[in-house]
Amino acid sequence: MHDIWYIFTVQVFFATTRPILIILLANIIQIMDKRFHLLTGTDVLTYTWIIPPGDLIAVGELVVIVDKGTKTRYFARVTRMAHDEKTGGVLVFGLPIGCISQDGIFRKPRTIPPLYSPVRALDAGENALLLGFMGELEVGFMMSGNQRVVDLPIGIPASVLNQHLGIFATTGMGKSNLMKVFCASAITTRNAGILLTDPHGEYATGPPGDPDSRGLVHHPKAQDGLCVFTIRGQDIAGEYGMKPLQIAHEDLNIADLGLVFDLTPSQYEVVNLLLPFATDEIIDFFINEDVESLPSHLRTTAYIGNHQDIAQRVRSAPPDALRLVQRQIRTLLDLTALFVDSSSSSLPEILAALDENKVVLIDIPGMSDAAELFILSAISRAIIRDRQKRFIEKGSAAASGRVLISIEEAQRVLSQRSEKTGVFREIAMEGRKFGVGLGVITQQPKNIDQRVLAQMNTLFVMGLADRHDREIIASSAKHDLRVLDTEIQTLDMGDAVISTVGIPFPVSCHIHFFEDYLDALWESAS
């Protein structure tokens, strides 16, 4: 009887209080809902807010926090997330990237929005506002989290190219595709000259072996904005309007032996002794003379030959070092025999094309690393010397055009070893004054001289597995990339985080697929 009475009492209690409990629960849910999408914590460096369970958000997503009082809009980028035990939602952390007041000016976020300000996604007007910061060299679409913002194309201002550019990515992340897209945009806009070498034969006509592939020669404006110098046969060169690549002995520099060979101190001594002489004379000397028979400084026998000054200069050098230098010069001439001879030179045409803001492609499929570096060094030296001469003779206006020299696997020539850097270090340190920048492409930024990295004002980071590499890039970037470490680690193939002085905050970008971009260019041209 007692149990029946207890059950009856409980049923009556719940029957009478159920409406009240439902109301209380609804109020609790309403209160919790009001906490979602509102700023719950903030300082100048971090914003936090909570989203409901089940709502999707991703690292890298862009949001706007609105100050209802001043109408100021604060832009932020999602950097990390965690579960919130109190609400059951997701606690989101964002990096402030800028703010816009009623005057419409985008500023660094030196103030903070009020607590509980609403947080929302960007609208079309805000996308259009951000579009105003983008440059003319289009490379892809803005990424907001996992979503491509197709009405917000990302472009680099051509004006920053003489301030050096870096592309950093592990194998397979899309470095070559990015460079092809970048060059295609340069061909379209004609706002800067770009020089790049291609020892694999993929940039001009597309990857070898695929008859349906396309390259830069298939650009709708290739005839006007692209100039290809090649070592290929006349059948292919003639079909695509390519020019034969020719480098004269006088275009070369004996100091570049250090770029392609590991020289001993004695060999560097020989190279330094030879620096006052013209390269064509040095080459003629080492091709036609037997250094074994040269009189040493210990003998009084006379030298009978056409290069008395050179023989006199090197007679004090160690014989073994002389023999090695002779062998290396002959080896280099053998490696570059297809395009190096005693007189003919393409350099005047190359310099003229760059002055006309064309993309100049040095197409040398099958060439060795040594040959590629030797030719790139010769052309780069000609570019910087020409710009320096014009600067001295006619002032800065004569050297005001922008030229970007692209270097793949740049750690080969921009490492900590100063003897391996040659003319490229000079361009990195002084090229900006003369309108010449370096495009440094590498998988190993930790092997690049830190002084060179510090000169780079535009960085494309396309995924780096090595933490040390990421830390080095973050410390060199003009924007703070340290808080984007998680995003950089999770980048998909073809995605990049871009930091440049032309855009006031780092942007996430999905790089166009080159062939799709070509189709779009042809469609817009028709």
Image (cartoon, grey):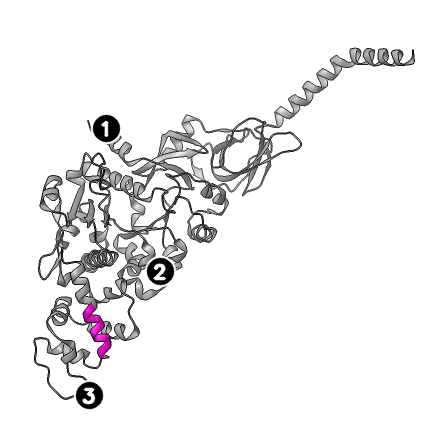
Q: Amino acid at mark 1?
A: Ser
Q: Residue furthest front?
A: 209
Please report the residue visible at 55 percent of the width from the left and 42 percent of the height from the top.
44
- Give yes or no for residue 388 being in the magenta stretch: no
Q: Amino acid at mark 3?
A: Leu
- Tell me how far mark 2 sits from mark 3, CA to CA: 39 Å
Asked whether the residues under the numbered discs 1 and 2 touch, taking CB atoms below 8 Å apart as contact, a structural biologist would say no
**First in sequence: mark 3 vs mark 1:** 3
Q: Amino acid at mark 2?
A: Ser
Please report the residue visible at 68 percent of the width from the left and 18 percent of the height from the top.
26
Q: Quadrant of the C terminus?
A: top left
Please report the residue visible at 39 percent of the width from the left and 53 percent of the height from the top.
445
- The residue that disc 3 covers is 298
- The residue that disc 2 covers is 415
- Tell whether 359 sits left or right of 112: left
Q: Which mark is residue 524?
A: 1
- Give yes or no for residue 322 being in the magenta stretch: yes
> Residue 183 in the image: x percent, y percent?
25, 42
Q: Above or below — where is 274 with respect to 175? A: below
Q: Quadrant of the N terminus?
A: top right
